[in-house]
Amino acid sequence: MYAQGKKALAICDRCGFTYRLKDLRYEVQNKQKNGLKVCYECFDPDQPQYDVNELSTIDPQSLYDPRVDTGEADSRRLFAFDPIGGGITELGSKTVGLDITGEIGTITVST
């Protein structure tokens, strides 16, 4: 059992000024005490951005059981900008629709 030390004095490990012992706090780094007792003005709270042990650094590079892209032909189709009709000529839009076919392919313009 320790004495209460109501009137005990101590020196701040950072600034060197004298304070009451009960007013000093342990300094914490990476959620562990580093042994320094510092005053209220010198106290530096543990910074969360330095805590790299809590972050997940897993970066998967490939998919498990991948599937073939079935919408590849639809994704290669180009449309003109039309805020009302969407530029899709099959739906009755009055804008020019573009269609690309083949490897080198042809571009057909329909009005």
Image (tube, rainbow, N blue to C red):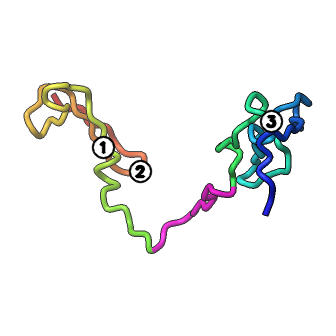
Q: Look at mark 3 in the image and give the residue it sits on.
A: 20
Q: Is residue 100 left or right of residue 38?
A: left
Q: Earlier in the sequence, mark 1 or mark 2?
A: 1
Q: Estimate how packed mark 2 is, as few (under 14), some (14 to 19) or many (20 or more) residues with alpha carbons within 10 Å.
A: few
| Region rendered in magenta | 53-64
Mark 3 neighbour density, 10 Å: few (under 14) some (14–19) many (20 or more): some
Question: Which residue is depicted at the point 78% across and 34% down?
Answer: 39
Residue 102: assigned label: none
Residue 25 rendering spot, x and y as whole percentages: 75, 42
Amino acid type shown at disc 3: Arg
Q: Main secondary structure of the magenta part?
A: loop
Q: Residue at x 38, y 67 (%)?
A: 68
The location of residue 56, given as percent across then percent down, is 60, 58
- Label 1, secondary structure: give it: loop
Query: Which of pointers 2 and 3 indicates the residue nearer the eye?
Result: 3
Q: Secondary structure at mark 2?
A: loop
Which of the 4 quarters of the picture holds residue 17? top right
Q: Nearer the viewer, residue 54 or 6?
A: 6
Q: In which quadrant of the rendered view does residue 23 lie?
A: top right
18 vs 110, nearest the viewer: 18
- Whether the magenta-drawn stretch holds residue 61 is answered as yes
Give the CA separation, mark 1 to mark 3.
76 Å
**x and y percentages locating residue 81 in the rendered image:** 25, 26
Q: Is residue 32 magenta?
A: no
- Judging by the rendered image, the residue that carries numbered circle 1 is 77
Q: Residue at x 61, y 62 (%)?
A: 58
Quadrant position of the C terminus in the picture: top left
Give x and y (percent) for residue 64.
48, 72
Quarter holding the N terminus is bottom right
Three-letter code for the amino acid on which mark 2 is drawn: Glu
* Mark 2–mark 3 distance (CA, rounded to whole Å): 82 Å
The tag on residue 103 is 2
